[in-house]
Image (spheres, grey):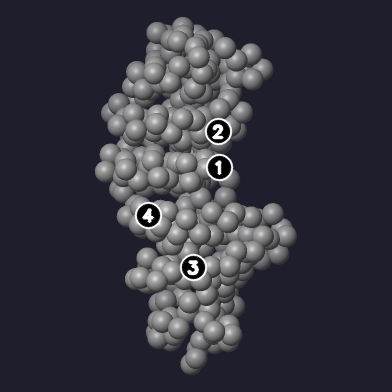
């Protein structure tokens, strides 16, 4: 069993498993962190204890805007770990994988949506959790997790926090194509240079762009490690010589993305668009708003795996 200091809710109150549901209901009735608002969903975070501590902080921050029940589960060797309760979150540290699905089924709010936040572990556990979930939000090594997830796309709606972080960048790139001159120039664009901290995200963006443009061939991708430590710093989609290009660039403040389209017959002025809150809590809040399957994500993942 994890030592209390390693537990994702080390300062939480230890309770018997059979008392957890009643204790959570009491906290909601008394308006603890939910401030008397009705709970809207259950978020089940699964992963190692250190990443679940980070998840617990994100769920607390999320709870200040959206009332949710949080369940934190780290896989281990314990058949009866002592649950800990803090705010509207319960944690089970070191639970045997064979018991995780039953524990989640007992603790989740069955009448409300369940979102599984996968932060790591044995990928074969995802299948069972997907059966309990309305949505699965992935993290972890994509080359390990995504091939397994593809076979489960018909079981639950899937997403990935890399995909969520790309939302504003994808939206801004798509907006370029509202301009007729950009659409006319697009067939000549075959080069994509992305600067940032995450090469996987760059490849996923390229896969999405290929699919969105209906390209059968791959777009030539150049990934450049950024110098600012930002997830994404610059995206340049261009043709030969880059005389015509669609450019997204993170502003010095990191709060905005600067957009510029230079194509024949159109030279648009640079505009600044807010990047938005990129914290874990904000990203999970965004995911809670999505209920349906994300066909663009599914197609992009399949293309990504085809590129790998």
Question: What mark, if any, has residue 225 been given in the picture?
Answer: none
Q: Which of 179 and 148 is in front in this view?
A: 148
Quadrant assignment, res 111: top left
Question: What mark, if any, has residue 280 been given in the picture?
Answer: 1
User: In the rendered image of this protein, does residue 202 appear above or below residue 144?
Assistant: below
Question: What mark, if any, has residue 302 been given in the picture?
Answer: 4
Q: Residues within 10 Å of mark 3 (few under 14, many from 20)?
A: some
Q: Is mark 2 in CB contact (under 8 Å) with mark 1?
A: yes
x and y percentages locating residue 265 in the rendered image: 48, 92
Q: Residue placed at 47% from the left, 56% from the top?
A: 308
Question: What mark, if any, has residue 55 been given in the picture?
Answer: 2
x and y percentages locating residue 79 in the rendered image: 45, 10
Q: Name the residue under label 3.
A: 172
User: In the rendered image of this protein, does residue 163 appear above or below residue 273?
Assistant: above
Question: Marks 3 and 1, how far apart in space?
Answer: 21 Å
Per the image, label 1 sits on a secondary structure element best described as: helix
Question: Marks 1 and 4, how far apart in space?
Answer: 25 Å
State the count of labels.
Answer: 4
Question: Marks 2 and 3, how far apart in space?
Answer: 29 Å
Q: Which of marks 2 and 3 is nearer the N terminus?
A: 2
User: In the rendered image of this protein, does residue 265 appear above or below residue 178?
Assistant: below
Answer whether residue 233 is visible to the viewer in this image: no
Horizontal side of residue 57 vs 285, given as left or right:
right
């Amino acid at each position: 069993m994890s030592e209390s200091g390693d537990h994702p809710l080390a300062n939480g109150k230890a309770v018997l498993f059979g008392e957890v549901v009643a204790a959570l209901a009491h906290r909601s009735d008394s308006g603890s962190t939910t401030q008397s608002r009705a709970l809207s969903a259950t978020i089940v975070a699964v992963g190692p204890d250190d990443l679940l501590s980070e998840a617990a902080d994100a769920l607390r921050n999320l709870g200040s805007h959206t009332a949710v029940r949080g369940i934190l589960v780290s896989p281990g060797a314990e058949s009866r770990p002592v649950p800990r309760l803090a705010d509207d979150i319960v944690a089970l540290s070191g639970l045997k994988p064979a018991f995780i699905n039953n524990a989640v089924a007992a603790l989740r709010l069955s009448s409300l949506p369940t979102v599984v936040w996968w932060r790591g572990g044995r990928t074969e556990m995802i299948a069972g959790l997907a059966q309990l979930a309305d949505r699965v939000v992935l993290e972890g090594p994509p080359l390990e997790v995504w091939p397994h997830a593809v076979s489960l796309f018909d079981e639950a709606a899937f997403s990935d926090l890399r995909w969520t972080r790309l939302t504003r960048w994808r939206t801004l790139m798509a907006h370029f194509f509202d301009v007729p001159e950009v659409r006319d120039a697009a067939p000549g664009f075959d080069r994509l240079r992305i600067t940032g901290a995450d090469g996987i995200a760059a490849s996923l963006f390229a896969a999405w762009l290929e699919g969105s443009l209906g390209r059968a061939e791959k777009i030539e991708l150049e990934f450049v490690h950024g110098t600012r430590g930002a997830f994404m710093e610059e995206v340049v989609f261009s043709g030969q010589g880059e005389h015509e290009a669609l450019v997204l660039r993170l502003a010095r403040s990191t709060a905005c993305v600067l957009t510029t389209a230079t194509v024949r017959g159109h030279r648009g002025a640079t505009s600044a668009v807010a990047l938005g809150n990129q914290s874990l809590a904000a990203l999970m809040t965004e995911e809670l708003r999505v209920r349906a399957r994300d066909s663009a994500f599914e197609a992009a993942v399949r293309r990504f795996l085809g590129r790998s």
